[in-house]
Amino acid sequence: MKALGIDVGGTFTDFILFDTDSGGSWVAKLSSGTDTAATVSEGIDHITGEGGCAPSDIGLLIHGTTVATNALLEFEGAEVGMLTTKGFRDVTYIGRHQRPENYSIQLDIPWQARPLVKRRHRIPVPERLGPPDGEVLEPLDRDAVRAAAEKLRDAGVDSVAVCFLFSYLNPAHEQQAAEIAREVMPDAYVCASSEVVPQFREFERFTTTAINAFVGPTVKSYVDRLAARVADSGVESGLHIMQSNGGTATPEVAAARPVTLLLSGPVGGVMGGIWSADREESYLATLDVGGTSADIGIVAEEGLVEARSRDTWIAGYPVMVPIIDIETIGAGGGSIAYVDAAAGLHVGPRSAGAEPGPAAYGWGGEEPTLTDANVVLGRLPSELAGGIELDAERAEAVIAKLAGEVGLPVLETAVGVVRIVNENMAAALRTKTVQRGLDPREFVLCAFGGGGPLQAAELAQISGIPKVLIPPHPGVTSAAGLLTSDLRYDVSKSFLRPLAGIDPKALQDAFAEQEAALEAQLRRDGRSDEEIGIDWAADLRYQGQSYELKIPIGSKEFDAQRIEELRESFHRSHEQEFGHHFPDFEIELVNLRLTAVGALPHPEHTEVSGGSLADAELQEASVAFTTDGEVRRIETPVLRRDLLPVGEPIPGPAVIVQLDSTSLVPPGAEVTRDAIDNLVVSATGNAQEGASDE
């Protein structure tokens, strides 16, 4: 079977085609351009031609996209209206009592500075439900809902979020209001909070639903166009789309809950890192450096690390959906270097993007970027993937202009640009390791993306990480990671009550009801019973706490003993997370959580035979490194990756080239190609000596 992974980035769209029978693979990178759906169609034709097959031979196609993330980050979404409970019009504006930054005198509160729904488009309607069972205290005024929908329609609103109090207990009022809105506004995108995230905490629930409505029309339009393009290309297997939880969804499910696509692309990178490491490493940090940003993920002993609900923020807004914990910073190959008013040198977050790109691309870029700095330092070959020929003179010209502004020689300025980017990445990595009590010295750094292998060894030296692993196709690892995922749907439902005295049968029935719905969805997606697995978990907290911990549930048979085991599991998790627990405190069960997985076929690793070092040597290049506190050029061998010997350590310095990325081995380090075609770099040496002393 042929499996195709496609990852759309800010600069390039990556393609990787696997033959799961022979183990063969083919890769391609195309400029993302302005119409990514058209780029995907073009890439399908190109990659199948390379692989000697027809699009109809593709049995699995998984796509990672940044369309939802970009719409939110760039604040270019729909004009959203909201129907909400009378008296609660300003929930999404007021937020919570705590300030995001307590002591800032220039505080930016995104939900107030950039409201997802303008106040004039937040329309309250009479209705009221009450806890604990969603009892109807005031019937829904259907006429008021219809009048509100007509007002929103006439105001040009093209997306509607329905957010009522206590709808997580009883969705009836929201369902009725959404139905009326769809009748009045048949062309509008309509979603209800009970469909998107049926949990308590109205600010986070309303905001998450508003985000869903804000990005919904953009995502639905993109998914519809993409699905049509894929079908027109001759692919008969359909389309799966990567979600932020580490699993995939069908286009229909993705369009209904587009908020689950936030961080879709970066999650594929983390999955690709796990696959490349072959699950042998207990602690793995992934570094994905693209054209615009660097994404850092963490894999612990238990597997993928999911962001805590209290820490899940994107573009400054709280998001109540499962998201793999990823730190994203503006540090990519296209990140622009500039000098501030105090003559300080900075790099990013502003990027040259796909167009015009770095000056070295020759596409009209006139500002210095990280890529230009690496060209000046001799660390990049003259031609990149996609047939891009680098113009060293243009790169040196923009770096020279920057050097004049900072008052340093050109070479030292280029080194400074690279050093700043590495330090920014190291700071982001520390937030995921040191600040959580994890020792970086126990980690392996898996580096990929077009720029990850170029920065990884020096970043590892700064961070104290002893080993770097570079996958076989680093430039398209995120695309490869997509193919290691399965269909996955997460469901949560508030079930707030004291754990003591809870009825085990009522708890089991509540889980079973949600499980049946998930099984039905996966069967509609074409999964057999043998391919379906569903895990249960519960959110617990001490009575009076503001936030809860997610506790896995092994057995699906509840009795008094199982309830007691759940209690003990929470105490242990609280001790591990916070360093203490309170055995005599009352515990509350807050939310039920279910994760349903529908297994998909995955590619397997294939062993490589390798060549010889003599065969791999292409030429020598004059490459600049910092050694003994001084920047100097060193004659460095340029090696062809696919001809490197297997199992033979090669001392640095070295530049290793391949179609989709370039890897840098600094002086004092060494690199070995392993049996499954990874490059393993020991991160010793002094290439970044003094980088952390400034």
Image (cartoon, rainbow, N blue to C red):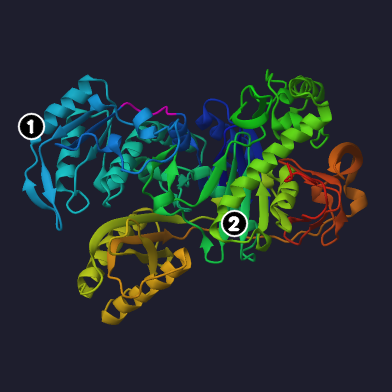
In the rendered structure, which segment of residues is drawn in magenta? 75-79
Q: Is residue 60 magenta?
A: no
Residue, disc 1: 143
**Residue plotted at (35% across, 61% down):** 594
Residue ID for mark 2: 434
First in sequence: mark 1 or mark 2? 1
Q: Is residue 443 above or below residue 410?
A: below
Look at label 2 and name its amino acid. Answer: Val
**In-image side of 652 versus 459 (left or right):** right
Residue 154 falls left or right of residue 77: left
Identify the residue shown where x is 34% and y is 31%.
112
Q: Quadrant of the N terminus?
A: bottom right
Instruction: Name the quadrant of the C terminus.
Output: top right
Q: Secondary structure at mark 1?
A: helix
Position of residue 51 relative to residue 546, above or below, is above
State the image coordinates of residue 60 (x, y, percent, origin top left): 52, 50
Amino acid type at image mark 1: Asp
Query: Is residue 256 shown to the viewer in this render?
Result: yes
Vertical side of 260 occupied by 467: above or below:
below
Residue 77 included in the magenta stretch of the image? yes
Give residue 113's position: percent from left, percent from top.
Answer: 37, 28
Q: How many other residues sit within 10 Å of disc 1, few (<14), some (14-19) or many (≥20)?
A: few
